[in-house]
């Protein structure tokens, strides 16, 4: 993993979120309503808008089918932009009651999800421009929510209540709830749990696999099974502080995961090895229908690459430009850094 480029001169304060379009435009959102668009091929600022609101731009995502369509969470609203001209939003959704933490589109791009500090997830009919459903299940801030690509009505969310929830969002129904506290070792010091509880800061999903970055410095991985269930597949230990981001790169195989933490470290994991190790472990347990869980084998040996970025990391995004596989990193500074993960070999290998 080598540093490829730096994107500077657009933000005045910390960059909070990132997204890369399929046509090589990087969007970055920051404090005090700052939104910037960058060229990835020839690193440089394309367009910039500031003062969208007194609120921060906390999450951004691009449409894959229409790469110029950009969604940005600004305070309690979701703004839609045409990335070719971001001077004014083309539409605004105002369905959330508190600050939005993440926006994401489903695979068909007919639904948009926005999770917020109230613990609710608003499911928006993206084509009809109206509210479809409100998901209520978290008792605290819902920090992250992602649609399940292989399940038409599936969604996974995580929150600061330490819960991960599998949803049928068509009915607003919780299919399974898993509390991350159930994975905390009983042999560990009580003080470690009190000061670093397993709050869920980030969730990402690829195929049938999803990962959760936790405040107690570990990553828990799971696999969807059937229509209403999932099972625990591993515990990844490599960070010394809370895991702020987990991310499955766009250009990698399903089993390649990148994590970033408050320790400033970025780690690339091989989950295929983790699954093999877990399958061979005699301590393997499954997630029961009632939500009870058992611990899988903790592993450190499946780290493919690791780098000390040096600053607390807020967001990760990825993109492939001119066959270069790039990882974009936003931290507490106003600068975005791009790292190269190597050339694209067409096989999705790390």
Image (tube, rainbow, N blue to C red):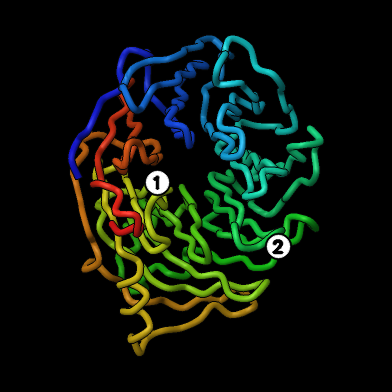
The tag earlier along the polypeptide, 2 or 1, is 2
Residue located at (29% from left, 36% from top): 312
Where residue 269 sits, quadrant-wise, is: bottom left
Q: How would you rate the neighbour count of disc 1 (Cα within 10 Å): few for under 14, some for 14-19, many for 20 or more?
A: many
Q: Position of residue 58 (x, y in %)?
A: 51, 30
Between residue 155 and residue 121, name the one nearer to us.
155
Compared with residue 232, is residue 18 higher up or lower down, i.e. above or below? Answer: above
Compared with residue 313, is residue 86 higher up or lower down, i.e. above or below? Answer: above
Residue located at (59% from left, 36% from top): 63
Describe the element under mark 1 as helix, strand or loop: strand
Residue to which mark 2 is pinned: 174
Compared with residue 37, is residue 189 higher up or lower down, i.e. above or below? Answer: below
Residue extending farthest bottom: 282
The residues tagged by marks 2 and 1 sit, at their Cα atoms, a distance apart of 24 Å
* Quarter of the image where the C terminus is located: bottom left
Quick check: marks 2 and 1 in contact, CB under 8 Å?
A: no
Residue located at (58% from left, 75% from top): 225
Q: Is residue 311 left or right of residue 163?
A: left
Residue located at (47% from left, 32% from top): 23
Compared with residue 78, is residue 290 higher up or lower down, i.e. above or below? Answer: below
Between residue 137 and residue 172, name the one nearer to us.
172
Q: Position of residue 148 (x, y in %)?
A: 60, 58
Q: Is residue 245 left or right of residue 293?
A: left
Q: Position of residue 126 (x, y in %)?
A: 73, 37
Q: Position of residue 325 (x, y in %)?
A: 31, 43
Q: Is residue 246 visible?
A: no
Q: Is residue 219 left or right of residue 226?
A: left
Residue to which mark 1 is pinned: 245
Describe the element under mark 2 as helix, strand or loop: strand
Q: How would you rate the neighbour count of disc 2 (Cα within 10 Å): few for under 14, some for 14-19, many for 20 or more?
A: some
* Quarter of the image where the N terminus is located: top left
């Amino acid at each position: 993993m080598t540093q490829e480029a730096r994107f500077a001169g657009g933000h005045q304060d910390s960059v909070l979120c990132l997204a890369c379009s399929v046509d090589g435009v990087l969007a970055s959102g920051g404090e005090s309503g700052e939104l910037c668009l960058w060229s990835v091929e020839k690193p440089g600022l394309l367009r910039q808008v500031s003062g969208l609101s007194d609120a921060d731009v906390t999450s951004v995502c691009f449409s894959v089918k229409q790469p110029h369509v950009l969604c940005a969470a600004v305070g309690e609203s979701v703004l839609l932009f045409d990335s070719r001209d971001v001077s004014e939003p083309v539409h605004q959704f105002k369905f959330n009651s508190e600050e939005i933490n993440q926006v994401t589109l489903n695979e068909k791009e007919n639904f948009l999800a926005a999770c917020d500090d109230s613990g609710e997830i608003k499911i928006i009919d993206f084509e009809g421009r109206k509210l479809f459903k409100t998901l209520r299940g978290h008792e605290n801030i819902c920090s992250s929510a992602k649609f399940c690509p292989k399940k038409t009505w599936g969604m996974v969310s995580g929150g600061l209540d330490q819960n991960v929830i599998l949803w049928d969002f068509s009915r607003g129904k919780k299919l399974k709830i898993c509390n991350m506290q159930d994975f905390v070792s009983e042999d560990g010091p009580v003080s470690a749990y009190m000061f670093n509880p397993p709050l869920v800061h980030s969730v990402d999903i690829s195929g049938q696999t999803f990962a959760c970055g936790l405040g107690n410095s570990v990553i828990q991985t799971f696999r969807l099974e059937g229509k209403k269930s999932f099972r625990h597949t591993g515990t990844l230990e490599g960070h010394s502080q809370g895991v702020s981001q987990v991310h499955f790169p766009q250009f990698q195989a399903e089993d390649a995961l990148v994590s970033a933490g408050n320790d400033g470290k970025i780690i690339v994991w091989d989950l295929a090895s983790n699954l093999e190790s877990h399958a061979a472990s005699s301590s393997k347990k499954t997630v029961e229908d009632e939500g009870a869980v058992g611990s899988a084998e903790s592993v450190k040996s499946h780290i493919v690459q690791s780098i000390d970025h040096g600053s607390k990391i807020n967001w990760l995004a990825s993109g492939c430009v001119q066959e270069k596989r790039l990882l974009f990193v936003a931290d507490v500074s106003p600068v975005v850094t791009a790292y190269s993960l190597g050339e694209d070999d067409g096989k999705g290998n790390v």
